[in-house]
Image (cartoon, rainbow, N blue to C red):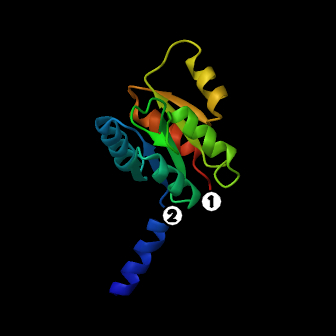
Amino acid sequence: MIAHRNWRVCPAETLMKTVLIVEDDPVNARVFAKILSKRGGLAVKHTENVDEVMQIARTKEADLILMDVSLARSVYLGKAVDGIKITQLLKADPDTAKLPIILVTAHAMAGDREDFLAESGADDYISKPVIDHQEFVNKIKSLLPKD
């Protein structure tokens, strides 16, 4: 009986999609994680370490990346980088190019969305603060791979 119960639980866990939150503000990271796990039923990872981001992307441990545009302390290969640059690197690498990336930023002036998407190659853009939690989850789920 126990083996049967475990068998039924495991497939659901393997089907759960994972969102990597790349965010340097711990409050924002916790809020996003809570919304995505509670309301969206998604698994969540968080880091602002660019080496970890690249590793998680290359090993396909995430199905989507939620990328903060302004990362104050992020460094990669000895150079300061922001979310735009990290997204450019991921989109330029054939191994990670298809990984959906959604930019998240408080920069929400007219034209910012288009400029950030064009410059970075990201798949979508969400402005902070996130007011409509369900819309936030729906946008993320719409870009998750359908396998």
Q: Position of residue 143 (x, y in %)?
A: 59, 44
For marks 1 and 2, the one nearer the N-term is 2
Q: Can I make out residue 62 in this image?
A: no
Residue 15's label in the rendered image is: 2
Q: Position of residue 8 (x, y in %)?
A: 43, 75
Dot 1 crowding, Cα within 10 Å, few <14, some 14–19, many 20+: few
Separation of disc 1 and disc 2 at Cα? 9 Å
* Residue occupying the point 55% across, 12% down: 110
Q: Amino acid at mark 2?
A: Leu
Q: Of 128 and 51, which appears nearest the observer? A: 51
**Left or right, residue 100 beside residue 79:** right
Which residue in the rendered view is the most extreme toward the top?
110
The residue that mark 1 highlights is 147
Image point (56%, 18%), residue name = 112
Give the amino acid at mark 1: Asp
Residue shown at the point (40%, 47%) measured from the top left: 47
**Residue 128, quarter of the rendered image:** top left
Marks 1,2: beta carbons within 8 A: no
